Image (spheres, coloured by chain):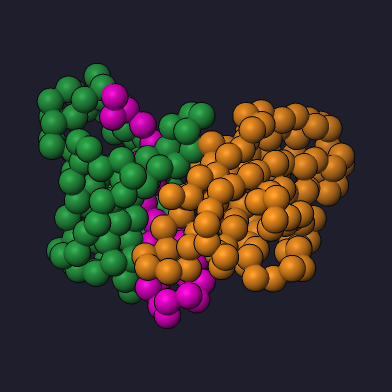
Chain colours: A orange, B green
């Protein structure tokens, strides 16, 4: 069974700083997807970024980028030029493309951006 | 826009009550999921369904059941609510699609259930 671990329960940075959230996972599969989800106080889960394991290039979405290290089973999220609206819970998640495509989530990191 | 709705944002029930949490999606998705979210544990899968009247257990099905009589609606049932079922419940849906291809899961706004 796959597991996802986020070792940082809480993080706090100043507005405009860069912050990196860590995530490690365990799987025996070779092909899979990794995600970062954002859950703001409104509770609506928002997909931030997606990485396909077969792609060596790290995914990027505007200020959000990942550092995907397949051999190390590491998948960190970097937020550049952080904004107050980035304050949220962030979840790392794993998905196998086979079957029902269930998501396996990490424990979450509560990120606070201070003015 | 894809829309996944849940019947209540907040719900308070008594121990022993039968509780129904409803989820409806409007995108003709085959797959529907129920997750439970707890602090320090993230989201954990309770049950999922990949077709009408089909269901499969997730990681923590004990104390729950589900019903999917129509494609757009997936209900989570707590037969006899207990205090340890106080939690946030999130519903999600996705296309089933081609095996191996990615299909995004879309989430509802969540129901915060308190069992007294």
Is residue B13 visible to the viewer in this orientation of the structure? yes
Corner quadrant of residue B85: top left
Residue B92 belongs to magenta span: yes
Q: In this view, does A47 lie to the left or right of A86?
A: left
Range shown magenta: B84-106
Residue at 29% from the left image edge and 24% from the top image edge: B84
Give whichever of A70, A6 is nearer the camera. A70
The image shows residue B80 at horizontal and vertical percentages of 13, 31
Corner quadrant of residue B18: top left
Give whichever of A101, B77 is nearer the camera. A101
Residue at 69% from the left image edge and 71% from the top image edge: A55
The image shows residue A109 at horizontal and vertical percentages of 62, 35
Q: Is residue A58 left or right of residue A105?
A: right
Residue at 27% from the left image edge and 61% from the top image edge: B49
Give whichever of B12, B50 is nearer the camera. B50
The image shows residue A108 at horizontal and vertical percentages of 57, 37
Residue B73 belongs to magenta span: no
Q: Quadrant of the C terminus of chain B?
A: top left
Q: In this view, does A37 lie to the left or right of A16?
A: left
Residue at 51% from the left image edge and 29% from the top image edge: B40
Residue B23, above or below A99: above
Residue A15, above or below B7: above
Give whichever of A28, A17 is nearer the camera. A28
Task: Tally the numbered discs.
Answer: 0
The image shows residue B81 at horizontal and vertical percentages of 18, 29
The extreme top residue here reads B116
Is residue B3 visible to the viewer in this orientation of the structure? no
């Amino acid at each position: 069974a796959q597991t996802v671990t986020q070792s940082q329960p809480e993080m706090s940075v100043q507005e405009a700083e860069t912050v990196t959230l860590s995530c490690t996972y365990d799987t025996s599969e070779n092909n899979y997807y990794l995600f970062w989800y954002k859950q703001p106080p409104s509770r609506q889960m928002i997909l931030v970024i997606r990485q396909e394991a077969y792609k060596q290039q790290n995914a990027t979405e505007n200020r959000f980028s990942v550092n995907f290290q397949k051999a190390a089973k590491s998948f960190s999220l970097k937020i550049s030029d952080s904004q107050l609206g980035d304050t949220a819970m962030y979840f790392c998640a794993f998905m196998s493309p086979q079957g029902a495509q269930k998501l396996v989530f990490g424990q979450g990191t509560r990120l606070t951006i201070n003015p | 826009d894809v829309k996944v709705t849940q019947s209540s944002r907040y719900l308070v029930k008594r121990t022993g009550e039968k509780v129904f949490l409803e989820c409806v999606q409007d995108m003709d998705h085959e797959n529907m999921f129920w997750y439970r979210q707890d602090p320090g544990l993230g989201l954990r899968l309770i049950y999922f369904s990949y077709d009408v009247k089909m269901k499969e257990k997730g990681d923590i099905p004990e104390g729950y059941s589900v019903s999917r009589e129509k494609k757009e609606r997936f209900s989570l049932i707590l037969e006899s609510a207990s205090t340890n079922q106080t939690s946030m419940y999130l519903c999600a849906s996705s296309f089933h699609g081609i095996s191996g291809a990615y299909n995004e899961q879309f989430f509802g706004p969540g129901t915060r259930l308190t069992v007294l």
